[in-house]
Image (cartoon, rainbow, N blue to C red):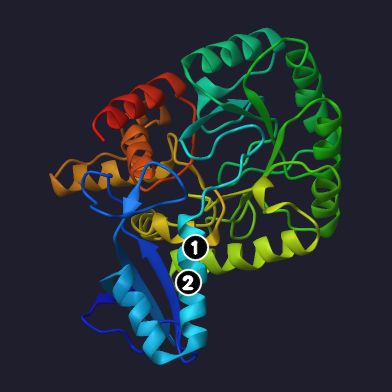
């Protein structure tokens, strides 16, 4: 477990060459943040930053105002000031419209699994009529996007053939497109051939758990101006939970996205077509996941919208079992059907950190929680 020490002073001036510097806005409501800056043109504001520095394998964090950050950089060097201003600009600038969606407000992505082995049994579907019924309900309940996947990516899952994946999902997407749904259709796939066929049959967004890990996929989405979700995953679903390791997960994943966004843009992908997903539970243990969630706002300085998927995940089970143990109760498992409350708690946390898209199996309950939370700010 990585320790980030809270200090009064950084290792060195912010963004100086001998250290790595990362800035995280501390999100607040407008009423809590007099003369604050808006995060990503959205509903959260900040007037303070958490500044994290890495020097070799050591980390420190210091809380400071934006003015203090800029004045420290200005005193040090022009180059430091330019880097600080670029990071702040990325945090503040309004996000582009993403596949017709206004990213200045939060959106819900519903989940439909056309798989017989999804980790959450109640989300397993196979026939068009049941998918259509769920799709209609999710749209009515407040989903802006519905993510449809035909290959399980739960921990330990084995790959299926591309032909089997297509057989499960393409005809269903084609049938859905015959109706005048307002919801955008996202295709959850890691296969180039499925992406291509899905796009040809009306898919609006492609969501790739491998983070578009080859140039063929990148060239395809670039040529077709296709909006994408780029997820971070360590290894693959079959092996990803076999002792995953990070120096400090939020920063390691931030650096992955920094490189990946530059690669995508250099190959012609429009920055406005990119959404990032830190991939909670994909090659991360409990401590990695919690570190990411505690430091979610670090990803705003990448300048693109953020998606978080926490719905019914094993992290909720682990934390609940830990609580039982603290009270002397031997509880060995918490079924995914009993993880709704934890899912909503994490959804509210994501919302309060300015995350633009929340991916969930439970659209009605999540949207209701967001409606109530928004009424208070």
Residue 78 placement, left or right of 227: left
Q: Residue at x 33, y 50 (%)?
A: 45
The residue tagged 1 is 89
- Please identify the quarter of the rendering in which residue 126 is found: top right
Residue 152: x %, y % from top left: 64, 36
Residue at coordinates 59% horizontally, 55% vertically from top-left?
233
| Residue with the mark numbered 2 | 85
Residue at 45% x, 64% y is 250
Quarter holding the C terminus is top left
Q: Is residue 172 left or right of residue 153?
A: right
Judged from the image, the secondary structure of the residue bearing numbered disc 1 is: helix
Query: Would you identify the image quadrant in which residue 66 lies?
Result: bottom left
In the displayed structure, would residue 93 be above or below residue 186?
A: below
Position in image of residue 148 (x %, y %): 66, 28
Q: Is residue 135 left or right of residue 41?
A: right
User: Decide: marks 1, 2 in contact (CB < 8 A)?
Assistant: yes
Percent of width and height locating residue 286: 38, 55
Decide: is 95 above or below 344: below
At label 2, counting other C-alpha atoms closer than 10 Å, the crowd grade (few under 14, some 14-19, many 20 or more) is: some
| Residue 243 visible in rendering | no
Between 87 and 147, the one lying in front of the other is 87
């Amino acid at each position: 477990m990585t320790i980030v020490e809270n200090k009064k002073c950084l290792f060195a001036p912010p963004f100086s060459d001998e250290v790595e510097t990362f800035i995280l806005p501390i999100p607040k409501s407008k009423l809590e943040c007099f003369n604050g800056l808006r995060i990503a043109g959205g509903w959260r504001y900040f007037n303070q930053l958490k500044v994290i520095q890495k020097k070799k394998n050591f980390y420190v964090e210091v809380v400071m105002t934006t003015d203090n950050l800029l004045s420290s950089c200005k005193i040090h060097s022009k180059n430091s000031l330019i880097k600080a201003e670029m990071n702040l600009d990325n945090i503040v600038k309004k996000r582009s419209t993403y596949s017709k969606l206004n990213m200045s407000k939060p959106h819900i992505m519903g989940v439909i699994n056309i798989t017989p082995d999804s980790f959450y049994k109640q989300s397993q579907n196979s026939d068009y009529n049941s998918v259509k019924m769920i799709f209609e309900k999710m749209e009515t309940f407040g989903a802006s996007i519905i993510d449809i996947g035909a290959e399980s990516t739960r921990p330990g899952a084995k790959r299926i053939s591309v032909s089997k994946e297509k057989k499960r999902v393409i005809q269903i997407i084609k049938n859905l497109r015959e109706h005048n749904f307002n919801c955008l259709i996202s295709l959850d796939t890691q296969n180039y051939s499925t992406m291509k066929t899905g796009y040809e049959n009306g898919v609006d967004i492609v969501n790739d758990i491998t983070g578009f890990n080859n140039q063929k996929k990148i060239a395809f989405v670039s040529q077709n101006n296709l909006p994408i979700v780029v997820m971070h995953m360590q290894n693959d679903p079959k092996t990803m939970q076999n002792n995953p390791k990070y120096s400090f997960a939020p920063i390691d994943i931030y650096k992955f996205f920094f490189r990946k966004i530059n690669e995508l843009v250099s190959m012609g992908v429009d920055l406005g077509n990119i959404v990032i997903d830190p991939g909670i539970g994909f090659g991360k243990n409990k401590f990695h996941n919690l570190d990411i969630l505690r430091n979610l706002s670090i990803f705003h300085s990448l300048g693109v919208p953020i998606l978080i998927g926490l719905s019914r995940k094993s992290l909720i089970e682990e934390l609940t079992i830990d609580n039982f143990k603290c009270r002397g109760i031997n509880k060995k498992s918490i079924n995914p059907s009993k993880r709704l409350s934890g899912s909503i708690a994490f959804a509210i946390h994501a919302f309060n950190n300015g995350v633009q898209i929340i991916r969930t199996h439970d659209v009605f309950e999540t949207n209701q929680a967001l409606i109530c939370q928004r009424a208070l700010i």
